[in-house]
Image (cartoon, rainbow, N blue to C red):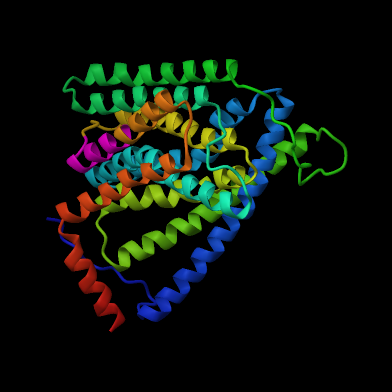
Amino acid sequence: MITLTSRKPFYCDWSVFVAVTFLLFAVSLIIILLASELFTNGVEWFGHRLNLGEGAVGSIFAAIGTALPETIIPIIAIVFANGASGESIGIGAIIGSSFMLATLAMFVVGIGIFIFSITRKRSRQVRASTDGMSRDLSYFLLSYGIALIAALLPMRAVKIALAVGLIGIYANYVRVTIKDSGEKGEDLRPLYLHKKGLPPHWRFITLQLAVALSAIILGADLFIKQVVAVSEYYAIPALILSLLITPIATELPEKFNSLIWVRKNKDTLAIGNITGAMVFQSTFLPMFGIFLTPWHLTEPAIVAAALGILASIVMVINLRIRGSLHAGMLIFSGLFYFAFILYVWLANGLGEGFITRAFSNIF
């Protein structure tokens, strides 16, 4: 059982806390939305100037660009936080980020496709490369599975060898993805920072990407602080914060890029942004985790990893059998995330304590 202690901010009055938090949440989401529009526009022109197909643009450049801030967070937690607690938070964030992408991020995109099919008369079928989706998910299952196996092995030398192997897997993934990147993106809007003259000069493309990523990081940081404030106000344990809340705060806001792309019927970019990030974060992050920590996973971390793998296996099987994906399949992936929430809730007896604190703050 986890002992909970509430840590209230200086504006501890419940109504003031809700008003301030809601306002800052709204501001952070507006910043992220605007920055995501800038980023998607810039990264499409980046890939266009390199003569790359949408598969490579979405799975490599967009995925790495939006995943870099989240890559730094667990490393900072491990290196600069205090001892075992820092390692626990860092490892939880490493496992939780890939788990969240495989489940909740897919769920959000599925909901987006469903809504846009009503409001913008688009198909509920995912119009992305079946081969590309299957390739990304297969690489993810391989690398995430290796990371999970490494945690169960006692020999440090074997763990290190597997960590090095993960980098080799990602290098091969990049090579294969660029080779099979598909058709070059067309129907591009003019670059926002250079609307006159096409194609835009490299300096304007890189400037727009730098501005967009900086704004995304700023908005995500503001979003994270509000999530942490809520978790501390209601005394949510560090374990849950690292496995559930931190990945939502760091990953989900930036997946607005994928929602923007599905709204424009650019599903290859939208799905590649998620599946490419899954491959990147299931290789580089566990590699850092293995090098910097003993890399032992707690039961909740193992359960989260297993559910993430299971969600991806179901999606791969669906792709192999049907040859395509439907919005309903993406929405179904979210059930694995909600199943983990239920597991954590029941395993740690959080329900009664959370409800009690909520009502005590209201009344």
The quarter of the image holding the C terminus is bottom left
Total numbered circles: 0
The residue drawn where x is 42% and y is 18% is 169
Q: At which x and y percent is residue 300?
A: 21, 43
- Picture residue at 42% right of the left edge, 20% below the top: 167
Q: Is residue 59 above or below residue 118?
A: above
Residue projecting furthest to the bottom: 363
Bounds of the magenta segment: 297-309
Q: Is residue 275 above or below residue 112?
A: above
* Residue shown at the point (49%, 42%) measured from the top left: 69
Residue 342: image location, x then y, percent:
23, 53
Q: Quadrant of the N terminus?
A: bottom left
Q: Is residue 199 left or right of residue 185?
A: right
User: Camera-side residue: 230 or 74?
Assistant: 230
Quarter residue 83 falls in = top left
Q: Is residue 254 visible?
A: no
Q: Position of residue 262 (x, y in %)?
A: 58, 43
Queried whether the magenta region covers residue 287, the answer comes back as: no
Q: Residue 259, can we see it?
A: yes
Q: Is residue 258 left or right of residue 302?
A: right
The x and y percentages for residue 359 are 25, 77
Give whichever of 164, 359 is nearer the camera.
359
24 horizontally vs 89: left or right: right
- What secondary structure prevails in the magenta region? helix
